[in-house]
Image (cartoon, grey):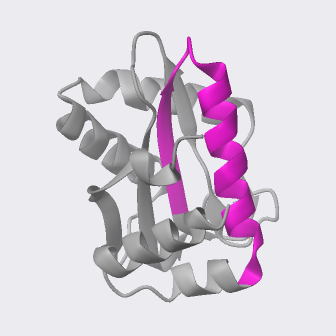
Amino acid sequence: MVSIKEYVSKELIFVQNEIPSKEKAIDFLCSRIAAIKNREASGLIEAVRDRESKISTGIGLGIAVPHGRLSRWGETTLSILLLRKPVEYDALDGKPVRLILLFISDKDKPCEHINLLSRVSYILSEKDNLQSLLKSETPDELYKSFVEYSVRV
């Protein structure tokens, strides 16, 4: 099984004071992924927003896991954003979100998509893990915490 570390790079981990809306957060992360992957951001944004229109990926506890699937994307890519000030997200519990884990995967690799979603869910379901991630002050701290917890999965 491929390590979760293979899906995320330090260049795609962000800690921000605030972002004005759910849509701006999605745009921000998709644009960063597009820049790293030399792709057009608009296709990523469209795929994630299309998925989000079906049901919110705000899963509760201040967490959202938006995602999109694209043809011929290649290897799944994960980006993480921690906000110091929560953003309204239409989460299932009605509470704002502070931690957003956005990933883009290939439509032709459904197992990779499901496996990553499952592993991320497991990491976030552990209360101590989540609290540690939410306390991160820098992108490097957030990356190290996330990768450390992913090793246990």
Report the residue at 78% width, 65% height from top.
Answer: 94
Viewport quadrant of the C terminus: bottom right
Q: Residue extending furthest front?
A: 1
* Count of picture labels: 0
Viewport quadrant of the N terminus: top right
Q: Is residue 39 magenta?
A: no
Q: Is residue 134 above or below residue 115?
A: below
Residue 55 figure quarter: top right
Report the residue at 68% width, 67% height from top.
Answer: 124
Nearest the viewer among 151 and 83 is 151
Residue 10 percent location from the top left of the image: 28, 61
Q: Residues in magenta?
A: 100-127
| Residue 9 visible, this orientation | yes
Residue 70 percent location from the top left of the image: 47, 17
| Residue 90 visible, this orientation | no
Classify residue 4 as left or right of residue 77: right
Residue 148 percent location from the top left of the image: 51, 73
Nearest the viewer among 146 and 30 is 146
Q: Is residue 59 above or below residue 113?
A: below
Classify residue 116 as left or right of residue 83: right
Q: Is residue 72 above or below residue 46?
A: above
Report the residue at 80% width, 56% height from top.
Answer: 92
Nearest the viewer among 147 and 53 is 147
Nearest the viewer among 95 and 4 is 4
Q: Residue extending furthest right?
A: 93
Report the residue at 67% width, 25% height from top.
Answer: 111
Q: Is residue 105 magenta?
A: yes
Classify residue 89 as left or right of residue 118: left
